[in-house]
Image (cartoon, rainbow, N blue to C red):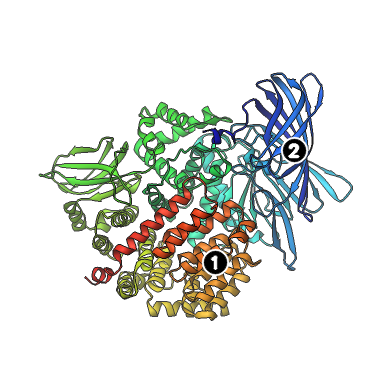
Amino acid sequence: MAETESFRLPANVSPRRYQIELRPDLIRSRFEGTVTVSFDLLAGTTRLVLNAAELDLSEARVETPDGASLTGEISVSGPEQRASISLPVDLAPGEGYQLHLRFSGALNHHLQGFYRSTYRDDEGLERVIATTQFEPTDARRAFPCWDEPALKATFAVSLVVDNGLTALSNGPVVSVEDLGDGSRRITFEETMTMSTYLVAFVVGPFEMTPPRHIDGIPLRIAAVPGRMPLTGFALEAAEHALRFLSGYFEIPYPGRKMDHVAIPDFSSGAMENLGCVTYRENALLADTDAASQVELQRIATVIAHETAHMWFGDLVTMRWWDGVWLKEAFATFMELTTTDAFNPEWQVWTAFGTAKSAALGTDGLKTTRPVVFEVGRPEEAEAMFDVLTYQKGGAVLRMLEQYLGPETFRKGISHYLTAHAYGNTETRDLWAALEAVSGEPVGNIMDSWIAQGGFPIVSVHAGPDRSTVVLHQRRFLYDGSETDERWSVPINLRMSVDGVVQRHRVLLDEESVELAVDGPVDWVVANDGSWGFYRVRYSAPMWQRLQQAGVEDVMDPFERLSLVSDSWAAVVAGLQDISDWVSIVGSLGEDRDADVWGAINSVFALLSLVADENDRDALQSFVRKTARPVWAQLGWTPVPGEPSRAATARARVLESLALIGADPEAAEQAVDRFRTFVTTGQALPPDLVSCAARVTVARDGDAGWQTVFAQYKGASTPQDRVRYLFALSESPDPSTLRRTLDLVLSLEVRTQDAPFLISAVMRNRHGATIAWEWLESHWEELGSRFSAALLARAFDGIPLVVDPGLAGAIHRFCAAHEVPLAGPRLDQLLERMDINVGLAARLRGTLTAVFDG
């Protein structure tokens, strides 16, 4: 605990207001600034301690409430990211102090703090942008501050920028002063009380859409010149999100304006700075005629996520980073609720099944963590932004909403936000608000999901005379071991009893529970709607009755997706045979749901890595047998009036058929159609472009790689740039894969994308060893080029390593080097790798019998 506490500031200062002026120099990549912090002193001291990182502090002065001016002596601790201001006299507790600081720093290239981004204009000239990314602990890299979420204050910002540049911050512009030297001082309206990580500065040659006024709030999209034609969809989605969320929460938007800003270089997907949300370009901008459904859906959900943060995170903020789930899980939940209202045909809650499965995948490890997890060091705060915080947290909230009822849940959330507006909270505050509205023991139910890691697998069987349903829980672990943990599992059951469909709600808070029904049970769906964050295992007789009823007839797409995912997890854990999973896939018939195919493809892709050459033909034959009938229905060309989700299904079935199943006809057509698409412009459905590009690289040798690389170089939209870049990782040729990896350290690939390319090559069955050896040989250069948070993404491909020799090399490297993965994240990746290595050893040599049987 001592080490954790050393990174927390002394609790003797309460900042009230920051007056900040910054002068960024985009040519020299430097900035200078001043800050005046008005604060109250809670305990007497001769030393003020605040956060500062990579800043040069040149002046410090304190004004006392009685008007005295004291010059402070500055000392800086780099490892602790702190600055200390020693004063000649003891300051007494009281209100009305002011600290004046002068400082300077570099616009770094690590995409954190106050950093430098670039793009090329229409004439090919490089243009420079200064922008910010402060979450979780990088406001201290832009100005000295008390950089902890509970230390809220207001912020009055001025930016001195060259004439001709746009400057944005959290509030509207209140004045512009021409300084007569080619620059202007732009002053912004003071913000509401908020945390330091939500402050934003953006300076550069941006263009803005005309504002749309939403209940008096001006809403704009900002992008670099030339990108304005790509803003229309974002503006539509952003307008919907702001209107919908204001109504859902029954609380007006807390800012005075809302700008959504596309940044050419950005480390994460987006950042919820109050009134000035920043994004990766491909998370905000799109050509609606060329973007796939998945790409447009991502833009809508990211905008909704960030808009939800204006309430969850900005208005009401977690007290410390161990509670980051309070904002991120809710923003995940609300992004789906909002987008579902924006476009119900997308069925985004079904699409969320893939993300939920990913969370279950991590939470089934021994190295998982509770959603609320102790955080001390800055890098540990960074590690909290993971699949457990977002996807598990969002799934658990959806489970609770479905158990309490959507309207009761909504009223509880509104009560929570109203009660804690402008303040900071902990998890128990949320439970208290929901209990007050619902009358349910929410804390007792939910603490088992938030305060302990893992989740249960719920086994389902009928009693001897089929007049009862017995539910049993145990912790699910991939190593198959049993433990004593228990959960309060809110279960929604749907069943047919003597031919009549019934629904029952059960709280499984013991090891087992027996539910009596009024007749013989025909079949049971033990996770109605698939909202529960648990896996289900049916007894053999119960599964047989589901099959007899017809899985497609009885289960909706989300439930079928979960059936595929749960069954495969049971195979990996050794709880059932792979032939059972094959039977489930067979029971789906000619399922055309996009997300069910996403779940199937994830297993097919892993089996493609696991299979030895003796088994590969049998695996590919089974994949083709499964995919061909569905592809025959979907085909290359969309049919007028078809469901909108058919576009995504078409792409996923083609991926299965042409890439995993190596179907010669489908693969040849994919290459031919892609060549025609890039040479003549003949239409190829947007949803198929990415897959066709991947097949081209995989099947068309160096010519295919060069074709796709040329498309990447000439990409006219952010979506094209990402599609073609990652398609380059599909080559089976070692020298071509090394050429792809060399792009990581070239000027051809943006910093934000480069580490992901390493992971993409590592996922290629021909590329795992090549990618890892390349990473080892370039380790020092990678460490100097990328921030720790970005470099960590290079390790995302580790879980799909199935070769024991390579796995051993990875273990040895990680033991001998400082890998930039804090908390349990590295251990989780290594455990998942070891599980897949064990799975491969178990299955190799057996697949032919399984798939030919």
At 28% across and 35% down in the image, what residue appears? 509
Residue 71 spot, x, y in % from top left:
81, 29
Residue displayed at 25% across by 62% down:
587
- In the rendered structure, find residue 366 and report the number of the disc placed on it: none
Residue sitting farthest toward the right: 180
Q: Is residue 345 left or right of residue 585?
A: right
Q: Where is residue 322 shown, x and y percent of the image? A: 50, 37
Q: Amino acid at mark 1?
A: Trp
Q: Is residue 676 above or below residue 146?
A: below
Q: What amino acid type should be assigned to the residue bearing mark 2?
A: Ile
Q: Which residue is mark 2?
A: 20
Q: Give the quadrant of residue 843.
A: bottom left
Q: Nearer the viewer, residue 346 or 318?
A: 318
* Element on which disc 2 rests: strand
Residue neighbourhood size for the residue with mark 2, other residues' Cα within 10 Å, grouped as few (<14), some (14–19), many (≥20): some
Residue 424 is situated, as x and y percent measured from the top left of the image, at 55, 31
Instruction: Name the residue carrying label 1.
Output: 774
Q: Tell me: 828 left or right of 231.
A: left
Circle 1 SS class: helix
Nearer to the camera, 571 or 128: 571
